[in-house]
Image (cartoon, rainbow, N blue to C red):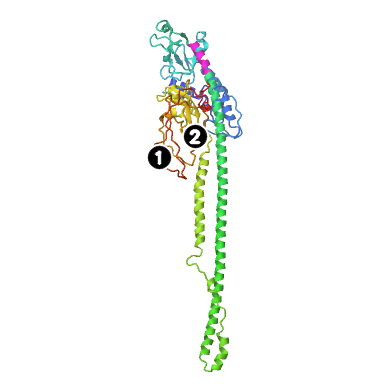
Amino acid sequence: MEQKGVQLDHEIISCSICLDLLKDPVTTTCGHSYCMNCIKSHWDGEDEKKIYSCPQCRKAFIPRPVLEKNTMLAVLVEQLKKTGLQAAPADHCYAGPEDVACDFCTGRKLKAVKSCLVCLVSYCEKHLQPHYKSDKFKKHKLVEPSEKLQENICSRHDEVMKMFCRTDQQCICFLCSLEEHKSHDTVSAAAERTERQRELELSRQQIQQRIQDRDKDVKLLQQEVEAINGSADKAVEDTEKIFTQLICLMERRRSDVKQQIRSQQETEVSRVKELQEKLEQEITELKRKDAELKLLSHTEDHTQFLHNYPSVSALSEATDSSSINIRPLRYFEDVTAAVSELRDQLQDVLTQKWTNVSLTVTEVEVLLSEPEPEPKTRTEFLRYSNTAHRRLLLSEGKRKVTVTRKFEGNFVPQVGVPSPVVPSPVNPSPVNPSHVKPLPVVPSPVKPSPVVLSPVVASPVVASPVKPSPVKPSPVKPSPVVPSPVKPSPVKPSPVVPSPRRATNVPSCCRKPSW
């Protein structure tokens, strides 16, 4: 019973806002007690509404009540403090499954507020007080509560790992630095932390700089998005206007064609009706004449017949029937054909030009394509041999490259020894008499054309040392000279092997390169 009474006193003297013992307790008109500062802070947040309420029962107060210190409750709290009794901790102060518990609490453990890296223990607020008050704990390093304190213990020596091995990149204890890590590069964990901290700061600076750069890029891209949207909207609006103009133009042309057809229809119908009326009048006149002639034919008086016949037999001028030229079954079909042809032409133009319009639309690119990286290794460089420069000639195994010079579509390798001069296949080579069979001499009034060896002026070619046989006429008696309009065929020279003697006049394109 006594314990229950103490517990009741604790509930009475606890502030429902800060969940601690009442400090300068005040009591509202609804009977609830709070710390002076706690209830003032709560009501300061309600100044805008001008309606002040009790945090527990939500009773409203207008205007803001003037609070006075509850003297009796303040004396009771002071007495409880002197007797060493403290208010029971609230439920949220106890450690849950996801919280770090105090290692010194017995029974239901409170939440740890700090962890000591020297003691390797986590403390609640109550058990942490010696670290604040005693000078022996001033050098201890307090950090936020952590469940990984055991990771700071060496599994081999059960010592705190205060050293760092740079060779193996791991934390070690002092005994490890004297044994298996003796020859390694070791420093204190604090020194390594300082070095890594500098690297971390540099990394953070780089990250911050990259963040700023990316922010600028994002803003730039956002501007590009707005520009793209604006340009696209304007393009859609302009194209709508253009297509509307095209539609209006087609409507006007349709109306014009319709009006022309109707006008031509009225004209032609009027002409036909006019001719029709003339023909009808002529028919009426002819019927009248026919009746008069019929009546005259029944006249028995010859004198009267002869007297009236000239006036009755005279006929009016007939309508020219040649003006009636009807085109059967073809009236405005040509107009339809012309319009159909125009439609086909427009469709062809649209089909041809539409590809250009589509390509223009698809060529709108804001982000440029990234260029391919330059080759860095031999394998990458020789991957695409067909992309070599046109003056580079690769061997079959692609293990040798030759620089070439381009002349008239032919590639001449630029090597140390010049290539042999090959005459152009277009012009015939000089005649070697040793390989030419003599032909019979046939007299002819037409002078044969000389054999043109080459348009390029060259030194005389020295023939083979074998002396050519003289050309002798055939023993056959020559036929009489008969002029012929046909020009005699020139003598086709046989292939000639050039003399080893060096020519003095070599064309400039075939000379040995100066380099």
Q: Is residue 140 visible?
A: no
Looking at the picture, does residue 340 appear above or below residue 390? below
Q: Where 201 falls versus 360 (above or below)?
A: above
- Height in image: 48 above or below 104? below
What element does badge 2 sit on?
Answer: loop
Q: Is residue 198 magenta?
A: yes
Estimate the x, y position of residue 417 in percent, counting from the top left: 47, 21
**How many angstroms separate mark 2 from mark 1 (CA)?**
31 Å
Q: Which mark is residue 452?
A: 2
Q: Which residues are magenta?
A: 189-201
Residue sitting at the far left = 156
Amino acid type indicated by mark 2: Val
Total of numbered circles in the picture? 2
Three-letter code for the amino acid on which mark 1 is drawn: Lys
Q: Position of residue 438 (x, y in %)?
A: 41, 33
Task: Looking at the picture, tell me which residue is in the foreground, 15 or 116.
Answer: 116
Magenta stretch: includes residue 194: yes
For disc 2, the neighbor class at 10 Å (few under 14, some 14 to 19, many from 20) is few
Identify the image quadrant of the N terminus.
top left
Which numbered disc covers residue 42? none
Q: Pinpoint residue 384: horizontal percent, then vertical percent.
A: 44, 28
In the picture of the structure, the residue carrying the numbered disc 1 is 477
Among the two numbered marks 2 and 1 on one chain, the one whose residue lies closer to the N terminus: 2
Q: Secondary structure at mark 1?
A: loop
* Vertical arrangement, residue 131 with respect to residue 263, above or below: above
Q: Nearer the viewer, mark 2 or mark 1?
A: 1
Task: Examine the residues drawn in magenta and state their main secondary structure.
Answer: helix
Q: Position of residue 294 (x, y in %)?
A: 51, 88
